Amino acid sequence: MAVVFISLFLAVSTFVVSLIFTSAFKKSSLGVEYIPKDMFTRVSILKPVKNADIHFENNIRTFYQQDYPDFEVIFGLETESDPEVEIITKVALEFPSVKTVIVYTGTKKDLNPKVDNLVKMEQVATGTHYWIADANVNVEKNVLSSLMHESLTKDSKLVFCPIRGSGSGTMASLAENMHLSFTVSGLIIGAWTIAERQITVGKSMLVEKTTLEKYFGGFSYFLKYLAEDYMLGKKYEKRKINISTNYTWITNINSDASFRSFFNRMTRWGTMRYHIDRKWYFAEMVFMNPTVVSIGLLFSGNAAIVQSSVFVILFKIICEFINFRYVNKNDAKKFKNIVMFIPAFFAKEFTIAFSYLIPLFSRKVTWKGKKIKVGKNSIINYEEMPELTALEEI
């Protein structure tokens, strides 16, 4: 009976996350008209770029189309020969009223390459706020206004966003997009709604410049962390600096992922989380993936346990399918994605389950072509470098 209770509890926990997720999604983002006119300040949109995909042009165009009245777009690329330069130039010419800057950051990077880019971009940024957004992110035209409304009216120094995955072209990309839209964003919203515990994901976040410089001296403080986005939020939280979300959604475009890349990404994320907070990591292993646990219980031979396990599996599928149809509407319009949904669901569940086991045996990950040993709080230790230690532990 204890196992039956656990199975049912897992199903209920999935239901709770789903309710939190879908109810939060109903909250509409605010537009520019909601910001008092005397509060407008310039925003610097910082976009680190490396090996952008075929959606890059359309993605960056959505940032130029923001309805906010005063912003600049700053790109961080390695060299002038990067293929993205031509695309950026083309889009920038379509919007001559928007200041565009390309910072060439070089091929030699200190520790975290993304943060290294941000450090060099902030040196030329003129805004009072930084909106950091990845190259594969696509946004609605009122997202910046909504984020700034949250920051200015609630004195929030860091505003983080939930993510929906879209653009699925392969079964693996569909699986990964389902994971982003349901589990990742469900965890973000659930943790914030229930426990006011931030989980900052760097796909899109608005950071107030003065606070970042006052307490940390800028982005350079976070060069040593692999999970720089999460640690940024934790450092703010520790100092009781205001953090919030107003459930302003951004879309991560992912069309050509393979299960290998999905597994490697999950392993890297899992390794970081394992070395940041193991209690939450083990809780995730149990409560965020009830499908694999329930499949294992199907072989128990106990009729009640088998029935409960089947209920958990079916209920999880239904929750995710509703989420898929409601949140990821563009993918849900494609018949092939509906056909692939069930196999993608089970492939996702097992990919995640196996990836969760890797950090228990190894703290090494491959990132940007380099081997890294992940230390406490995701401190980066490249194999060819002496190990670093955290200057401040959480």
Image: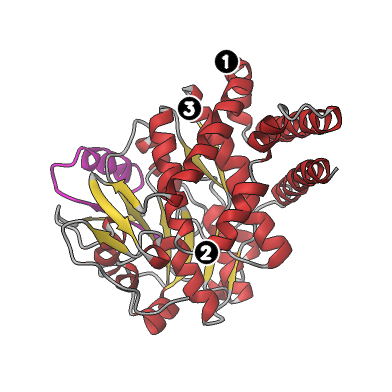
Identify the residue position indicated by label 2 in the image: 277
Q: Quadrant of the N terminus?
A: top right
Q: Secondary structure at mark 1?
A: helix
Looking at this view, is 360 or 242 the one in front?
360
Q: Position of residue 284 (x, y in %)?
A: 61, 51
Magenta segment: 69-95
Are dots 3 and 2 in contact, CB under 8 Å? no
Identify the residue position indicated by label 3 in the image: 172
Identify the residue position indicated by label 1 in the image: 336
Going by the numbered disc 2, the residue's amino acid type is Asp
Furthest-front residue in this view: 301
Real-space Cα separation, disc 3 to disc 1, in angstroms: 13 Å
Q: From the viewer's perspective, is the residue at label 3 or at label 1 nearer?
A: 3
For marks 3 and 1, the one nearer the N-term is: 3
Q: From the viewer's perspective, is the residue at label 1 or at label 2 nearer?
A: 2
Q: Position of residue 23 (x, y in %)?
A: 76, 49
